[in-house]
Amino acid sequence: MASISRFSIVILCARVSPVIAIAVIKPLFPYRSISMTIRSFSMKVSMGLAALFAAATIVSAPVSAAEYPERAVEFIVPWSPGGGSDTLMRLVSNNVEPFLDAEMPIINMPGAGGTVGLREASRRAADGYTISQVHEGLLVATETGITDLVWDDFDPIALMTASPQYLVAGPSENYSNFEEFLTFARANPGEITMGVTLAGVPHLHAAMIEQAFGLIFKYVGYEGTGQRIRALVGGNLDVAIGDISSSKQFVDNGDLTFLAVGSMQRLETTPDVPTFTELGQDLELTVTRGIVMPKGAPQEVRDVLETALSELAMDPTYVEQTNNAGADVDFRGQDAYRTYLTNLNGTVKSLASVLAP
């Protein structure tokens, strides 16, 4: 017995029952010693269990990220059903499941220029099971004081589509191409009427043209693209910002002219229309739709979703459907999308005073 430590006796007896442990070893220990020994034993057991649970937590965390997604990923589209953004994002939702191994149901939350749905998305858990969509309108809304949300409240995952915008002109005796338009506009500052959505993305694009080429436009506000293009056809405007779906039919029949396009390269649909880059200024005038997560999602989760979206962007069915909806697939992953938003944000900041309603 002398060769066995008191603590070893406690452990051996405690394996059977704490009550037996006390009864058996009481003669060997003073009362105070028994109390202290049992207390020490309990502390050691508690510490061991705590270490075990901590280790289990550390091991399980990466497993959760590796198994993402384990359920549907909710997609908050901050626009009304049937609009351009909703249509294009539904194409993502409808086609992504084979690449993500999870459904992506759409939840429309329109209001306040898209900021109602985005605010709700920003409040959701950063676990990868809520995503949303942004375009240039959020940056304009932030800088003009419409919302206190900023694009950096989210983690950019992927830019999916781009809809290049055109500088469209009505019939004029003064110009028939961009070079002639530029000469006339510089000689007549403030005389060219430009149709835009005031404090919206078209206003931003027109202001970028003003800034790049040293022009001054007289702005006329319209709610939507269709309204300003009809005003242009009717002779109520000189130029406007438009897109292919709203304008090409009028260009084809000779009512309107595409002076320039905001893509980085000429487009197959309008091969004779020069880019602003060709015309001397590195301007990218597009309405992009990109997917974001609430800020702070695990990097592994963001990477899984980015990979699924990159594979979707190469799917022929998805590409065809997107083209038929009037947009181009222009996939850019996390880093490239963040760079795009960062650069654009600098431009919007420099034009905030012009865009303010």
Image: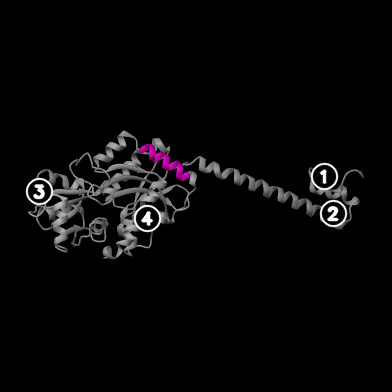
| N-term mark: 3 or 2 | 2
What is the x, y in percent for residue 8?
A: 84, 45
| Magenta part of the chain | 301-312
What is the x, y in percent for residue 37?
A: 82, 53
Q: In which quarter of the image is the N terminus?
A: top right
| N-term mark: 3 or 1 | 1
Label 3 with label 1: CB-CB less than 8 Å: no
Give the amino acid at mark 3. Answer: Asp
Q: Which residue is drawn at 26% across and 43% down?
A: 265
Mark 4 vs mark 1, foreground winner is 4
Q: Nearer the viewer, residue 54 or 157?
A: 157
User: Is 142 on the left or on the right of 217, as rendered?
Assistant: right
The Cα atoms of the two marked residues, 3 and 1, are separated by 99 Å
Mark 3 vs mark 4, foreground winner is 3
The Cα atoms of the two marked residues, 4 and 2, are separated by 63 Å
Residue 103, by quadrant, is: top left
The residue at which mark 3 appears reads as 255
Residue 327, by quadrant, is: top left
| N-term mark: 2 or 1 | 1
Label 3 with label 2: CB-CB less than 8 Å: no
User: Is 169 on the left or on the right of 331, as rendered?
Assistant: left
**Within 10 Å of the Cα at label 3, are there few (<14), some (14-19), or many (20+) other Cα atoms?**
some
| N-term mark: 3 or 4 | 4
Q: Nearer the viewer, residue 115 or 282?
A: 282
